[in-house]
Amino acid sequence: MTDDTTTPLHSRVQGPPTDYPFDDGYAWEDEYPTIHDEDIAYAVFDWDTLDPELVERHDGILELSLEEASALDLDRLNDLHRWAVARVYTQHGELARAVEVCDTILATTVADRCIWLSYPDIHLERARKLTALQRFDEALAGLHRCRGEDRANEREVARYVGVVTLLAGDRQAGLALLLEAIHTHAEHDPEMALHLGDELVTLGRQEAVEVYTAGMTIARSRNMADLLAELEDALEAAEASDLSSGA
């Protein structure tokens, strides 16, 4: 067994609070164990090429207690280190405070932004935390702002907007948004319906049935037999599950 103390803290930290939603491992993954750095809002780069002091400061923040992290002056930190603070808050269930740090990061002017972070992903992380806090209007407003970011993943934003709209209580609009996204992005992501349906099952939502069905239509039209079989199995399991419309 590998000695965990040798693993850099940017890929080795404790998990989030147990009531943190969206842990299906696709769109809403945020468990913070050993995972790819880019999955938690870091840009793609080699940590070994960074100034060691920069990395040590980042990793040191991740080791801080909640009290110690709260004592930090965000104005004296760069965005990379601010994001480490946001992660500490998230680990301790302080999602509202994590959102405040995200707001500070996103307020950085484009010219002063940190090249080691993916700012569109910070928007998505912020939306997830706001959704967990049931602050749906703020989450949706931030997602729409995310669309104006360079390198924003429209497919991912569309998924988030649809799911958050569902969770906010607008089933008709949320489902329509998700089905539109599935068909819009079918060319580049024909498996979107499968992953999104699995996510909805995890959330206990019966809209997974419509999503899987839409995915089956796409799979048939593209002669994707293996994908179709997976969707059929997923649909059968979903129909046999105790899912809710969220009403």
Image: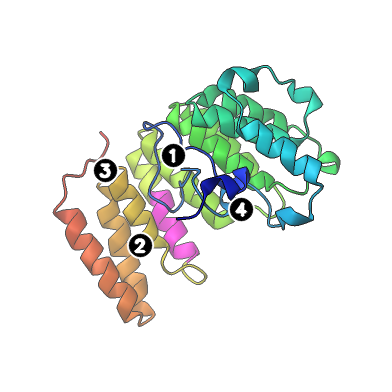
Q: Position of residue 29 (x, y in %)?
A: 46, 47
Q: Earlier in the sequence, mark 3 or mark 4?
A: 4
Residue under pointer 4:
38
Q: Position of residue 83 (x, y in %)?
A: 66, 36
Residue under pointer 1:
164
Q: Which mark is residue 194?
A: 2
Instruction: Name which quarter of the figure residue 237 lies in.
Output: bottom left
- Identify the element where label 1 is drawn: helix
Which mark is in front, 4 or 2? 4
Three-letter amino acid code at the position of disc 1:
Val
Which mark is in front, 1 or 2? 2
Three-letter amino acid code at the position of disc 3:
Gly
Residue 102 appears in view: no
**How far apart, in angstroms, are the residues tagged by discs 4 and 2?**
23 Å
Q: Is residue 204 left or right of residue 221?
A: left
Which mark is in front, 3 or 4? 4
Which residue is at a point 86% across and 42% down the rendered structure image?
111
- Identify the element where label 2 is drawn: helix
Q: Is residue 145 left or right of residue 139?
A: right
The magenta segment: 176-185
Please tell me whether residue 13 is drawn above or below residue 24 in the rendered image: above
Q: Earlier in the sequence, mark 4 or mark 2?
A: 4
- Identify the element where label 4 is drawn: helix
Bin the neighbour count of mark 1 within 10 Å (Cα to Cα): few under 14, some 14-19, many 20 and up: many
Q: Nearer the viewer, residue 55 or 161?
A: 55
| Callout 1 touching callout 4 (CB < 8 Å) | no
Q: Earlier in the sequence, mark 1 or mark 4?
A: 4
Which mark is in front, 1 or 4? 4
Bin the neighbour count of mark 4 within 10 Å (Cα to Cα): few under 14, some 14-19, many 20 and up: some
